[in-house]
Amino acid sequence: MHAPLMNPQQNNPGQAKYAEARRVTIIGAVIDLILGVAKIAIGIVGHSQGLVADGIHSLSDLITDFLVLWAAKYGSIEADADHQYGHERIQTVATVFLGAALIVVALGIAIDAIDRLINPESLQTPARLTLLVAAISIVAKEWVYHYTMRVARRTRSALLKANAWHSRSDALSSGVVLVGILGAIAGLTYLDSVAAVIVAAMIIRVGWHLGWDSVQELIDTGLDKTRLEKMRRSMLAVEGVRDLHRLRTRRMGHQVIADVHVMVEPLISVSEGHRISEEVERVLEGELQDDTDITVHIDPEEDELGPPALLPLRGDIVPQLTSQWSELAEASIDHVVLHYLDRKVDVELHLNAQSGNDARALHRAIEQLRERYADDSRIGRINAVVSLP
């Protein structure tokens, strides 16, 4: 029996998202090319300077389409040795440039509109055919906007979202042209320029919003305070979590990267502490509702009071303890548990007592061991757990 063939994209979500981004962007690019050529040609024949300018705007969208394809391709590459968090910030950088492109285009529309307000005699009465081309452009670019935005939301791509708004800016500029043509035909030539300034302001706002959000991501701006507080409450509700601190977040493409220090009961086992960290990760993943990369650091006590003391490690403590104990009692040490708390090392001896061992003698030996370490500022409490045969 043969196993079913797997689609490579099923094993690489990044490539699947790139395939969707590539498809929607190519469709948009073909529409931009057709509309750009048509608007320039009909604008020249029909004496509409606005339609010619709008055609140039459509052709300029081809540049951003290629930028989106390039960024989506390389941004979807999986993590490697040199880029261990992946390449998604390629899309973030491209979104900054795309936001800037929207602002530049909007400024061009505004400057041209203001110039026409100052010099209305430069306007010509366009042919009625230009109305049809402008209307077709509005419908086509608005469809591209909605199609691209659906894919952007499904793949959580800020880059595709920016390109969707770029398409809508073209639809809006075509709307300005349509109003201008109607106004020119009716004799109200100023409507074209007034509408152009309003639309330019809207495009600048969108471009600034997209670019600024991406810049914030590049400088590792964390999530907003409301989301952080919600995350904090969810983590504190996890069984075994006593407190938390050093909660840090940042975005990278559609991912949220978070790390947090969680305080737990200091004497629990390492495996229980690890289980608590897994539960905290699970809760955070559900809370963020994004692709996440979460690191949970388990603390047995508050570690924000300053740098920890350089306490000795097991290899420095256990051999000396074993040697000291062998001089005091016959019961052997099964194993030693060390607790690094309050800037000292607490020692827990697990003793394997034999049937002939005297309990009072064991107690005296433990007290003598404590006396030997009484002047050692690094050693805290010394306790014993005796296993009877």
Image (cartoon, rainbow, N blue to C red):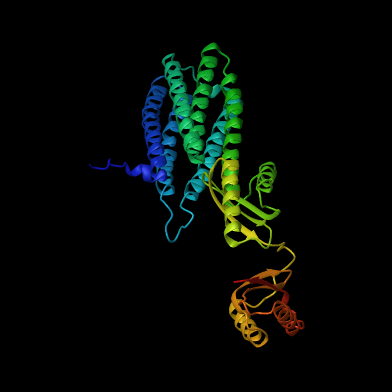
Who's the residue at 62% across and 82% down the image?
Answer: 322
| Looking at the image, residue 143 lies above or below residue 62 | above
**Where in the figure is residue 159, as x and y percent of width and height?**
49, 40
**Where in the figure is residue 272, as x and y percent of width and height?**
60, 57
**Image side of residue 26 versus residue 166, left or right:** left
Q: Residue furthest left?
A: 1
> Who is closer to the viewer here, 3 or 208?
3
**Image side of residue 229 versus residue 2, left or right:** right
| Looking at the image, residue 173 lies above or below residue 274 | above
Who's the residue at 60% across and 28% down the image?
Answer: 197
Who's the residue at 36% across and 42% down the image?
Answer: 9
Quadrant of the image occupied by residue 302 = bottom right
> Who is closer to the viewer here, 218 or 243?
243
Q: Residue furthest bottom?
A: 327
| Looking at the image, residue 105 lies above or below residue 324 | above
Quadrant of the image occupied by residue 17 = top left
Quarter that holds the C terminus: bottom right
